[in-house]
Image (cartoon, rainbow, N blue to C red):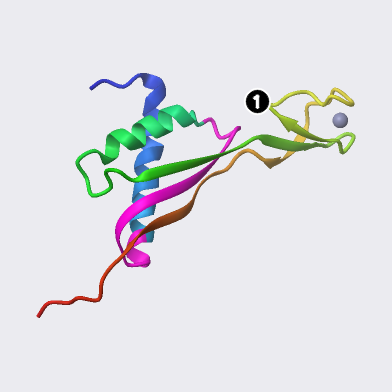
């Protein structure tokens, strides 16, 4: 299978998300991860479709196959440094609709984080 150049970025991110989820599962003694949730901001530069595709491809034939991925996409939100207008943007920095300024304090949209990992608990069933 070949991946386009654009997907390499998401593939690397998908790999680190899986690592994080596995660590989380270990910490919470989960035997099987059934669902993970990630939060992706519109300014993070992540293509959610490519991320989903990469994750799906990476978990095939692993213990994570069949895992559900929930992507919470957050729009970009900023506050204008000139006039304090709060504005929800698209996936790039826009000019302030009030004063046409371009200097924003970004309040939301740069997130890329694992927010939850759900799974099946390990049974206390030790063999001696
Ligand atoms: Zn403004």
Task: Using residue 91 as the reference point, say whether residue 33 is left or right of it.
Answer: left
Q: Quadrant of ligand 1?
A: top right
Q: Give the camera-side residue of 74 and 95.
A: 74
State the image coordinates of residue 10 (x, y, percent, origin top left): 41, 32
Task: Using residue 75 as the reference point, say whether residue 97 is left or right of it.
Answer: right
State the image coordinates of residue 99 (x, y, percent, origin top left): 89, 25
Mark 1, Cα crowd under 10 Å, few <14 / some 14-19 / many 20+, is few
Q: Can residue 36 be found in the magenta stretch?
A: yes
Q: Which residue is mark 1?
A: 92
Q: Across the whole image, how many numbered discs are drawn on residues?
A: 1
The answer to whether residue 128 is above or below residue 51 is below
In the image, the segment drawn in magenta is 25-45
The answer to whether residue 59 is above or below residue 122 is above
State the image coordinates of residue 40 (x, y, percent, origin top left): 54, 39
Q: Residue furthest bottom?
A: 128
Residue at 35% across, 32% down: 54
Residue at 31% across, 22% down: 3
State the image coordinates of residue 5 (x, y, percent, origin top left): 37, 20
Q: Give the camera-side residue of 18 and 31.
A: 31
Task: Give the quarter of the figure containing the C terminus.
Answer: bottom left
Task: Give the quarter of the figure containing the N terminus.
Answer: top left
Quarter holding residue 24: bottom left
The answer to whether residue 81 is above or below residue 22 is above
């Amino acid at each position: 299978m070949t991946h386009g150049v654009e997907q390499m970025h998401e593939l690397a991110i998908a790999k680190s998300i899986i690592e994080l989820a596995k660590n989380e599962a270990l910490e919470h003694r989960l035997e099987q991860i059934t669902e993970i949730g990630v939060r992706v901001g519109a300014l993070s530069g992540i293509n959610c479709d490519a991320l989903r595709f990469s994750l799906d491809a990476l978990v095939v034939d692993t213990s994570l196959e069949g895992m559900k991925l929930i992507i919470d996409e957050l729009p970009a939100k900023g506050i204008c440094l000139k006039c304090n207008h709060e504005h929800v943007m698209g996936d790039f920095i826009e000019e302030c609709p009030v004063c046409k300024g371009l200097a924003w304090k970004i309040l939301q949209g740069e997130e890329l984080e694992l927010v939850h990992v759900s799974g099946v608990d390990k049974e206390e069933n030790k063999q001696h």
